[in-house]
Image: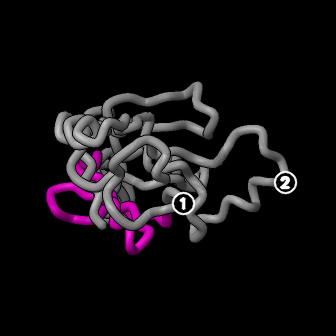
Amino acid sequence: MKKYLFIFVIAPIFLFANIEPLSSSQEMKADLVTVVKSERKLYLSHEGKILKAFNIALGGNPVGHKKVQGDQKTPEGYYRLDYLKLDSSFYKALHISYPNATDCCNAQKIGKSPGGSIMIHGQPNNQGWLKSFFKQRTDWTAGCIALYNSDMDEVLKYIKVGTPILIKP
């Protein structure tokens, strides 16, 4: 009787004891995306705890805040991931809410457009052998934040539209 009690009652308790925490951590969503341009890193965090980190590529002229269209810079500051774009020229893309009112005002003061269409995205679509050129430690975007396609899929598991993003120098 004791043998059956252990097999059918006690053993399953130990067997399934860790399932709930594992399930909860997989469903946890990031409440902040942080990009540190100088590190070429993107961090997903929840309540101050880093959940995941990824290597990234930036614009061809990454130092400094984006000011105008065509400057090859990635913006700096607080923004939001305001929509998912699945029909991009790149493998899946999340739009960053650049430009904000301040960005627009600053560009207008010098008679220029602030630009737009700044995204977190994967590698270019339909590039065949050229995909190997787009390595993460090389800055090749026009001002966006690029990830490997597999990393982009992982990011999409942890965030939702509306998540804030902080882009640091």
Left or right for 100, reference 153: left
Q: Amino acid at mark 1?
A: Gly
The mark lying in front, picked from 1 and 2, is 1
Quarter residue 105 falls in: top left
Q: Quadrant of the N terminus?
A: bottom left
Q: Is residue 94 magenta?
A: no
Label 1 to label 2: alpha-carbon separation? 21 Å
Tell me if mark 1 has few (under 14), some (14-19) or many (20+) residues whose alpha carbon lies within 10 angstroms of its own: some
- Please state which of residues 47 and 70 is positioned toward the viewer in this rendering: 70
Identity of the residue drawn at 61% across and 39% down: 90
Tell me if mark 2 has few (under 14), some (14-19) or many (20+) residues whose alpha carbon lies within 10 angstroms of its own: few
- Please state which of residues 132 and 153 is positioned toward the viewer in this rendering: 132
Pick whichever of labels 1 and 2 is earlier in the sequence.
1
Name the spot of residue 160 as percent of width and height, x first.
32, 36
Q: Is residue 36 magenta?
A: yes
Q: Quadrant of the C terminus?
A: bottom left
Quarter residue 116 falls in: top left
Above or below 39: residue 53? above
* Magenta range: 29-56
Predominant SS of the magenta segment:
strand
Name the spot of residue 29 as percent of width and height, x first.
28, 46
What residue occupies the far top of the structure in this picture? 87
Above or below 101: residue 140? below
Taking the image as drawn, is residue 6 in sight? Answer: no
Q: Amino acid at mark 2?
A: Trp
Q: Secondary structure at mark 2?
A: helix
Residue at mark 1: 60
Residue at mark 2: 129
Left or right for 148, reference 2: right
Name the spot of residue 165 as percent of width and height, x first.
27, 49
- Please state which of residues 66 and 157 is positioned toward the viewer in this rendering: 66
Identity of the residue drawn at 49% across and 53% down: 72
